[in-house]
């Protein structure tokens, strides 16, 4: 009796199981149907299989975009991006090309972690949304594309600030000045002038700290080279003398840099404090000028908010 009941149970289970479509046409139809019901796992499985079989050119086009959308709606942005890229390469004139392009940009944004990490995807997102805006200026999603492009641009700017902050932490202020100036020059539309003025001014102001470390290091080298002047080898003494001349020039140069940058930093910080008295950066600029030390690394701003907002499906 137990075997009989077990056999009936197996038969019922088998009968309840849906038959797996065998032909590409059947897989295509069932895959599209699953996607319409938001059964993304089933849709991905069937559409992948259908695309590996024989479909008409139109069915291949529809299956490819449906597969990409299924990955996208399932939150698998990496595979969604790959499929959107392939779709755009295969079907650039498709009516769905603009949808694929927009969602590809969204995929890249979702694959971007933030300014502290690699920003390759942020660069790609910026380029994709720029392309979308240029190609489809009358599309209803243009404003959203501009918003997302600005987010990507902000990430790129903050990445430069992150690198500059690393130089600040290492007291390589001459290097951080170059990074901050690049941000001010190239990303003026996404970074506030009070913040950039403060960071640039502070880096100039504290350059004497870097100069002291460099001068101390050079003096150690100078001491070693002066010892070599005692050598019996005339060639070694000649080399040592040349090196001493170069080291002394470097020491003089760093002293000049320290003096000039301190004055320039004081000037910039004074402007920031005067122009933005109610800004936290204006306040800190004034505090530095009054003798308070502010060597803390500037925290970067990550515009990618990992919240439910990023899980909302884009309407296309």
Image (cartoon, helix red, strand yellow):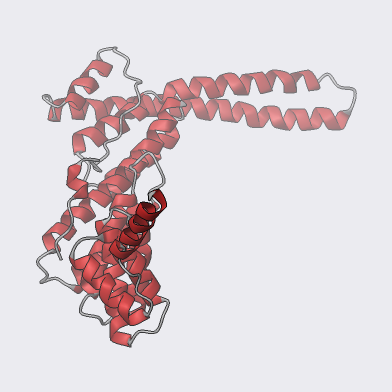
- Above or below, comparing residue 14 to residue 6 in the picture: below
Nearest the camera: 134 or 30? 30
Q: Give me the residue at 19% from left, 39% from top.
A: 192
Residue 291 rendering spot, x and y as whole percentages: 29, 12
- Above or below, comparing residue 135 to residue 239 in the picture: below
Q: Give me the residue at 50% from left, 19% from top.
A: 212
Q: Give me the residue at 32% from left, 73% from top.
A: 64
Q: Is residue 4 left or right of 134 when viewed as pictured?
A: right
Residue 145 rendering spot, x and y as whole percentages: 18, 60
Residue 109 rendering spot, x and y as whole percentages: 29, 52
Nearest the camera: 174 or 110? 110
Q: In which quarter of the image is the C terminus?
A: bottom left
Image quarter for residue 63? Answer: bottom left
Nearest the camera: 219 or 7? 7
Can residue 71 be seen?
A: no
- Above or below, comparing residue 111 to residue 12 in the picture: above
The residue at the far right in this view is 232
Q: Give me the residue at 37% from left, 60% from top.
A: 79
Image quarter for residue 225? Answer: top right
């Amino acid at each position: 009796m137990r075997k009989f009941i077990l056999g009936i149970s197996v038969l019922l289970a088998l009968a309840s199981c849906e038959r797996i479509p065998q032909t590409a046409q059947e897989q295509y139809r069932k895959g599209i149907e699953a996607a319409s019901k938001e059964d993304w796992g089933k849709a991905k499985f069937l559409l992948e299989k259908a695309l590996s079989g024989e479909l008409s050119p139109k069915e291949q086009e529809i299956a490819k975009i449906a597969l990409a959308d299924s990955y996208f709606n399932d939150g698998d942005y990496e595979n969604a991006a790959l499929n959107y890229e392939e779709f755009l390469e295969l079907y650039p004139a498709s009516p769905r090309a603009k949808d694929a392009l927009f969602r590809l940009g969204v995929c890249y944004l979702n694959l971007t972690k933030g300014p502290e990490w690699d920003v390759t995807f942020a660069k790609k997102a910026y380029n994709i949304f720029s392309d979308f805006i240029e190609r489809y200026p009358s599309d209803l999603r243009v404003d959203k594309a501009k918003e997302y492009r600005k987010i990507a641009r902000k990430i790129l700017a903050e990445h430069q600030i992150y690198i500059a902050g690393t130089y600040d932490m290492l007291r390589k202020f001459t290097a951080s000045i170059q990074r901050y100036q690049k941000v001010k020059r190239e990303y003026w539309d996404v970074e506030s002038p009070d913040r950039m003025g403060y960071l640039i001014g502070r880096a100039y102001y504290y350059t004497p700290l870097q100069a002291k470390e460099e001068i101390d290091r050079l003096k150690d080298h100078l001491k070693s080279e002066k010892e070599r002047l005692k050598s019996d080898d005339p060639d070694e003494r000649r080399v040592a003398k040349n090196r001493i001349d170069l080291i002394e020039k470097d020491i003089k140069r760093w002293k000049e840099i320290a003096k000039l940058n301190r004055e320039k930093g004081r000037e910039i910080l004074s402007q920031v404090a005067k122009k933005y008295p109610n800004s936290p950066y204006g306040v800190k600029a004034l505090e530095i000028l009054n003798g308070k030390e502010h060597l803390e690394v500037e925290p970067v701003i990550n515009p990618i908010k990992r919240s439910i907002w990023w899980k909302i499906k884009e309407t296309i």
